[in-house]
Image: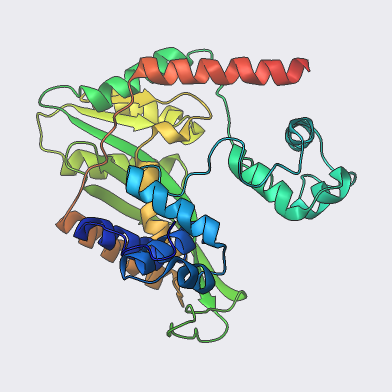
């Protein structure tokens, strides 16, 4: 029928699409070969020549031509129901592997690897990897969590989230915390610079040159940081930082501080000072809920960008780096925008508690 078939007719758009498919390095091999065959047929190559070039049969080339003439590129490359490679592993075996991955562990180990699971189930490592990938199972990863047991969790949550989403008019809302034990670490050998094909390097060993504590207050509205490095983080140092806030915030403005439950923040000396400064209002986050204090997000910024990979020969050098980072940040501040409502958070926490209770019962 197609021994002397005329060139396959196609539009410029279809040709461009087939050329893209034929040059792909990621698509299935059968799709790439089929696209090449149709392009050869469009260039006038005989059916026999196309079959030889694409290492397939004349009947297959004829079938591809008919499909293209009838449907164009619609459903191109799809395998018809009942055709194609048959599954070599039963659904029962797949479910067995999934169940073992989720609810068991190999003897003497904390989690499964593809090698261990393949040996235990009598399948290949590639099969295990395909099953895990299809179901989003990642036994090598683990995320930490902590559900607060604070009896006033909901009350404190609503209070703090309310400050984020609807701050008092004319007041200043500050997210406050201390980053303690900031270490001035000096590497024992010079670091090697980055170059093409290799990341920068630094030695794993270091010399300790002392520590400092960074007190920081994040302005929720503007994103600016008020920071102060002090030797310790006792109530005396916290009072110094409160006095700095008092001097910095314009008189007449109410000040709302979002804090964690560290004992220093509730010390008798602190309470006595606050009684004499009634414009200060303290809002404590629930216990085990550091994620609710936005300044913690900024602490991650300064750790990643100014401290962790630094090398400091003294505490003063570390403090200079911290102050420089704060200055640069405040030159172009970008506030962190809180979006989750208290109801959304409470619902998520309740789901977590239900799930945790179910696990404990089992």
Q: Which of 30 and 193 is in front in this view?
A: 30
Residue 179: x percent and y percent?
44, 49
Render colour scheme: rainbow
Residue 101: x percent and y percent?
75, 38
Look at the picture and state if 337 lies above or below 124: above
Quadrant for the C terminus, please: top right
Q: Is residue 62 visible?
A: yes
Q: Which of 258 and 132 is in front in this view?
A: 132
Looking at the image, residue 166 sits to the left or right of residue 183; the answer is: left
- Hey, which quadrant is residue 312 in on the image? bottom left
Looking at the image, residue 112 sits to the left or right of residue 242; the answer is: right
Residue 162: x percent and y percent?
28, 20
Residue positioned most to the right: 107
User: Which residue is depicted at the point 82% across and 39% down?
Assistant: 105
Q: Can residue 319 be seen in this view?
A: no
User: Which residue is depicted at the point 32% across and 20% down?
Assistant: 341
Q: How many labels does the image show?
A: 0
Quadrant for the N terminus, please: bottom left
Q: Nearer the viewer, residue 279 or 269?
A: 279
Residue 46: x percent and y percent?
41, 70
Q: Nearer the viewer, residue 71 or 330?
A: 71
Look at the picture and state if 148 lies above or below 111: above
């Amino acid at each position: 029928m197609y021994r002397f078939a005329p060139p396959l007719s196609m539009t410029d758009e279809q040709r461009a699409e087939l050329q893209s498919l034929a040059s792909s390095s990621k698509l299935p091999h059968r799709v790439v070969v089929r696209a090449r065959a149709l392009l050869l047929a469009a260039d006038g190559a005989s059916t026999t020549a196309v079959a030889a070039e694409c290492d397939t049969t004349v009947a297959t080339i004829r079938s591809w031509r008919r499909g293209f003439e009838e449907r164009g590129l619609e459903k191109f490359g799809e395998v018809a129901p009942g055709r194609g490679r048959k599954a070599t592993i039963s659904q029962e075996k797949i479910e067995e592997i999934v169940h073992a991955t989720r609810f068991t562990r190999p003897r003497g180990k904390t989690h499964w690897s593809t090698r261990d699971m393949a040996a235990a189930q009598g399948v290949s490592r590639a099969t295990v990897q395909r099953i895990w990938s299809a179901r989003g199972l990642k036994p090598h990863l683990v995320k930490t969590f902590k559900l607060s047991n604070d009896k006033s969790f909901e009350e404190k949550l609503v209070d703090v989230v309310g400050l984020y989403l609807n701050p008092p008019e004319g007041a200043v809302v500050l997210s406050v915390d201390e980053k303690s034990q900031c270490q001035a670490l000096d590497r024992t050998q010079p670091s090697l610079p980055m170059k093409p094909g290799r990341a920068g390097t630094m030695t794993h060993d270091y010399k300790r040159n002392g520590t400092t504590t960074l007190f920081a207050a994040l302005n929720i509205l503007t994103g600016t940081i008020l920071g102060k490095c002090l030797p310790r983080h006792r109530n005396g140092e916290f009072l110094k930082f409160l006095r700095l806030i008092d001097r910095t915030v314009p008189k007449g403005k109410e000040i709302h501080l979002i804090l964690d439950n560290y004992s220093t923040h509730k010390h008798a000396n602190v309470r006595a000072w606050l009684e004499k400064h009634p414009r200060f209002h303290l809002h404590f986050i629930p216990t085990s809920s550091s994620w609710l204090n936005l300044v913690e997000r900024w602490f991650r910024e300064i750790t990643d960008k100014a401290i962790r990979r630094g090398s400091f020969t003294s505490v003063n050098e570390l403090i200079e780096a911290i102050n420089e980072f704060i200055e640069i940040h405040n030159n172009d501040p970008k506030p962190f925008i809180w979006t989750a409502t208290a109801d959304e958070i409470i619902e998520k926490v309740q789901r977590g508690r239900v799930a945790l209770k179910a696990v404990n019962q089992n």
